[in-house]
Amino acid sequence: MDGLKLFWSFGKISVHEILDEKSVYLNAFFALIFLDNMETIYSLLGVSEESGTFIALSVTATLFSFVVLSQVVLIQKRKKGGTGELKYFVPTFLLYNLYYSFLFLTSLLLLVFPGYYIIFSHFHAPAIASILLIPLFLPGLFFLFYFSMVPFIAVLDDEISGKFFKKSISLVKKKLPLVACTSLAYLAVELAAILITVIQDPMAKIIFKLILSIPDAFFTLVITVITVKVYYYLVNLPNSATDNTQSAP
């Protein structure tokens, strides 16, 4: 089974699991909606977006979102017979997500954005400039794909100590197309919030933000569950596996 089909297989399993076990995931779902709309609540309370209070509250909302996602990952781990406590899960999951995000964003900042100005200043033909820009994304894609398992290895693997990045690379090599689909889907969910920025009317922005936060919360739960399932699938897959007939558990 190719990567995309396998990804969809995990996706359908994850969606059905969340819908069938509403009582397990409902609190996380509503918590993500609330946290996603906290900035709107701050604005309605008259808190300026440039104020230190607004920034502090935004950071707090982000941190609590990792608490929610850590709980979802812990639920998945316990289903596999693993153990763990949320108070240990949260800082570890948060820390390695920050490492992972930092590597991905740094590659874009150091290569893509400077390259964009250099290339477009020398090539006035947009088509040629765009083609020349593509290789600058490759380091970012490497970090996005090959290190995507790092936060999950850190909290799901009780045997390995350190070397999470090396372990992630070895796992991703087993089924790169599958991991690529999962990582790109996660990135798409994260970037969906950018749609809000094009709205100028404050009230329309609040309403659209609320509406968008509902599918955003659901798909965030889904992609988190998918990634955990992909992790366990890769762990159980032989290093030399090339058999495309294996399906999602």
Image: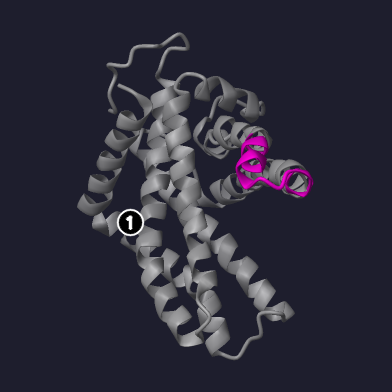
* Residue at the extreme bottom of the image, as rendered: 46
Q: Taking 70 as reference, is 146 above or below it?
A: above
Q: Residue at x 71, y 80 (%)?
A: 50
| Label 1: element kind | helix
Magenta region, residue range? 118-134
Residue 133 counted in the magenta span: yes
All told, the count of numbered labels is 1
How packed is label 1: few (under 14 Cα within 10 Å), some, or many (20 or more)?
Answer: many
Q: Quadrant of residue 162?
A: top right
117 or 37, which is in the foreground?
A: 117
* Residue at the extreme top of the image, as rendered: 240
Q: Taking 156 as reference, is 58 above or below it?
A: below
Q: Quadrant of residue 148?
A: top right
Q: Residue at x 26, y 39 (%)?
A: 13
* Residue at the extreme left of the image, as rendered: 20
63 or 86, which is in the foreground?
A: 63
Residue type at mark 1 is: Tyr
Q: Residue at x 25, y 57 (%)?
A: 22
179 or 149, which is in the foreground?
A: 179
Q: Taking 11 as reference, is 50 above or below it?
A: below
Q: Taking 50 as reference, is 154 above or below it?
A: above
Mark 1 lies on residue: 25
Per the picture, the main secondary structure of the magenta-coloured stretch is helix
Q: Is residue 42 left or right of residue 74?
A: right
Q: How is the image coloured?
A: one colour
Quarter of the image for the C terminus: give it: top left
At which x and y percent is residue 160?
59, 25
At which x and y percent is residue 105?
68, 47
**Residue 75 visible in the displayed image:** no
